[in-house]
Amino acid sequence: MSLPGELLSESAIQDMIGLLVHAIEAAGALIIFTGAIWAFVRFASTGLRRCSLIAEFNKIRLSLGRFLVLGLEFQLAGDVLRTAVAPSFTEIGQLAAIAAIRTVLNFFLTREIAQERAEIEQDQKETALRPADL
């Protein structure tokens, strides 16, 4: 039932938010998928060139981790938006559980990314300090 001053009905707003949630979650899934494909292509091409896979592996994992973190942020945004219109206590509880799981996942991914970055920088410094082979 619409009040005279109401621009959109609650069901119209819920439908619109539902479309936005699907778009945001699709964007998150696309980001994760793109990162996975990119990492696989880099991994395969490094192996085919017979390069030192160990040296490149950390760089590939670091990049994939960034894609995962960004994709998970989009997924969380979709979950938050889903509960924006008249959430029930069940939906709020589910959002809290999902947010907690994704936050913990993001925390560990971010920490691992920082460790990988530090290892890569340390390797680069060590390589730069080594005397050139004659």
Image (cartoon, rainbow, N blue to C red):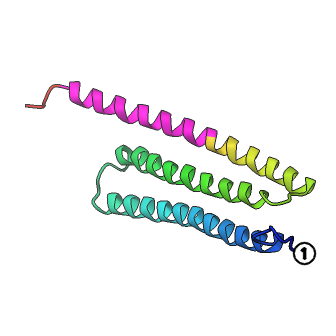
Which element carries disc 1, helix, strand or loop?
A: loop
Front position in the image: 95 or 88: 88
Q: Quadrant of residue 118?
A: top left
Screen quadrant of the N terminus: bottom right
The residue sitting at the left extreme is 134
Inspect the magenta stretch and tell me whether residue 118 lies in it.
yes
Q: How crowded is mark 1: few (under 14 residues within 10 Å), some or many (20 or more)?
A: few
**In the displayed structure image, the side of residue 19 where residue 93 appears, left or right:** right
Name the side, left or right, on which 64 lies relative to 59. Answer: right
Residue occupying image coordinates x 48% and y 64%: 34
Please report the residue visible at 87 percent of the width from the left and 50 percent of the height from the top: 93
Q: How many marks do you count on the picture?
A: 1
Residue 124 is drawn in which quadrant? top left
Check the image and name the residue furthest to the front. Answer: 4
Q: Classify the position of the C terminus by image quarter.
A: top left
Task: Report the side of 91 relative to 20 (left or right).
Answer: right
Q: Residue 75: percent from the left, percent from the top?
A: 65, 58
**Left or right of 35: which side holds 101?**
right
Q: Where is residue 47 in the image (x, y as percent from the top left)?
A: 35, 59
Residue 100, position as x, y percentages in the image: 75, 44
Residue 3: % across, % down: 87, 70
Q: In which quarter of the image is residue 128?
A: top left
Q: In this view, does 31 lie above or below 113?
A: below
**Residue at position x 64%, y 64% from top?**
25
Residue drawn at (66%, 45%), measured in percent from left and top?
105
Amino acid tagged 1: Met
| Dominant SS in magenta | helix
Residue identified by numbered label 1: 1
- Magenta span includes 38: no
- Image: magenta residue range: 107-130
- Compared to residue 50, the image places residue 123 above or below, namely above
